[in-house]
Amino acid sequence: MKQKLACALLTAALFLVASPLRNATAQQSPKDAPGASTTNSDAAKTKAGAPAASASPRSADDHVQVPLKPDDKVILNTGIVNVVISVTDPYGRFVTGLGKDHFDVFDDKVKQQIAHFSDDDAPVSLGIVYDVSGSMKERIHRSIRALKRFIETSHDDDDFFLIGFNDRAKLVQDFTTSGDQVVSHLMFVQPKGSTALYDAAYIAVEKVAQGRHTKKALLIISDGQDNNSR
C-alpha cells in the first residue's frame, strides 16, 4: 500500500513540473521560433488570397516613366527664321553700317535671340521699264550703257524682266537671271512713237508681283512725260 502511494505522488509531481513547461512552449511567439516567420507569413498571405511577392533592388538601367499632365508643354526643337529688312531714313535713303546690336526681334512680345546677323546684299526681282519712244533717239546709247553698268553691279541671283514702251507697252523679256539677255533686246532698237508711260508702269507692277524674291523693285528709264496711255 505504501509503495503504490509513493508511485502516485511521484507521478503527480512529474505532471506538475511538466505542465508549466508545456504551456510555456505553446505560448512561445512565432517570431521566437526558428524558421517560423517565413512559413507563417507565407501561409497567412496564401490564406488571404494574396500571392507572396519578392522585392529585388532596381537596376541602374531601369527607366521610370512619368506621366504628362494635360497642360504640360513639350518643345521638341526650334528653327532659325530668316528676317530680311531694309532701313531707310526720312528721305528714303538707305542706312548702312548697322550691326546686330542695333536690332531687337520680338515674337508675340517675347524678345528673341539673334543667332546670326549679316548685311550682305539680298537678291531682288527687278522689272526694267524702258522708254523707246521718239524722244529717246539721242539718249538711247547712253541709257543702254547706264543699264549695262547697273546690271553688272547687281546681285548674282537677281532676276529681271523688260518692258519696252512707246505708243504701246509690251513685255519684251520675261523673268531671267541673265542681264546680258535683257540688254541684247535693246542693242538694235529704233526709238519712235509716243510715250505710254503709265500703261507700262501698270503692267510692270502686275508683273513684278510674280517675282520669286521677297524684295521687288521697278527701274524706269525714260526722258519724258506720259502722253499716250489708255
Image (cartoon, rainbow, N blue to C red):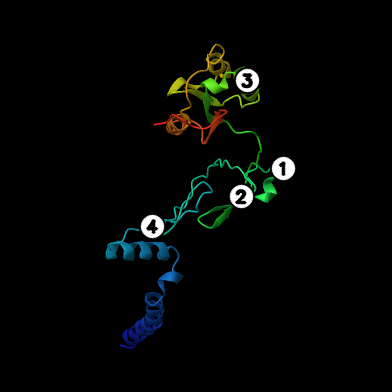
In this rendering, the answer to whether 149 lies above or below 43 is: above
Q: Are marks 3 and 1 in contact (CB under 8 Å)?
A: no
Specify the label residue 97 is tagged with. 1
As helix, strand or loop, the secondary structure at mark 3 comes to helix
Quote the CA–CA distance across marks 1 and 4. Answer: 75 Å
The residue singled out by tag 4 in the image is 53
Q: Nearer the viewer, mark 1 or mark 2?
A: 1
Point out which mark residue 113 bears.
2
Mark in the foreground, 3 or 1: 3
Tag 2: amino acid: Gln
**Disc 1 marks which amino acid?**
Gly
Residue type at the position of mark 3:
Lys
Label located before the other in sequence (2 or 4): 4
Measured Cα–Cα span from mark 2 to mark 3: 41 Å
Q: In the image, which is nearer the foreground, mark 2 or mark 3?
A: 3
Label 4 crowd bin: few (<14), some (14–19), many (20+), radius 10 Å: few
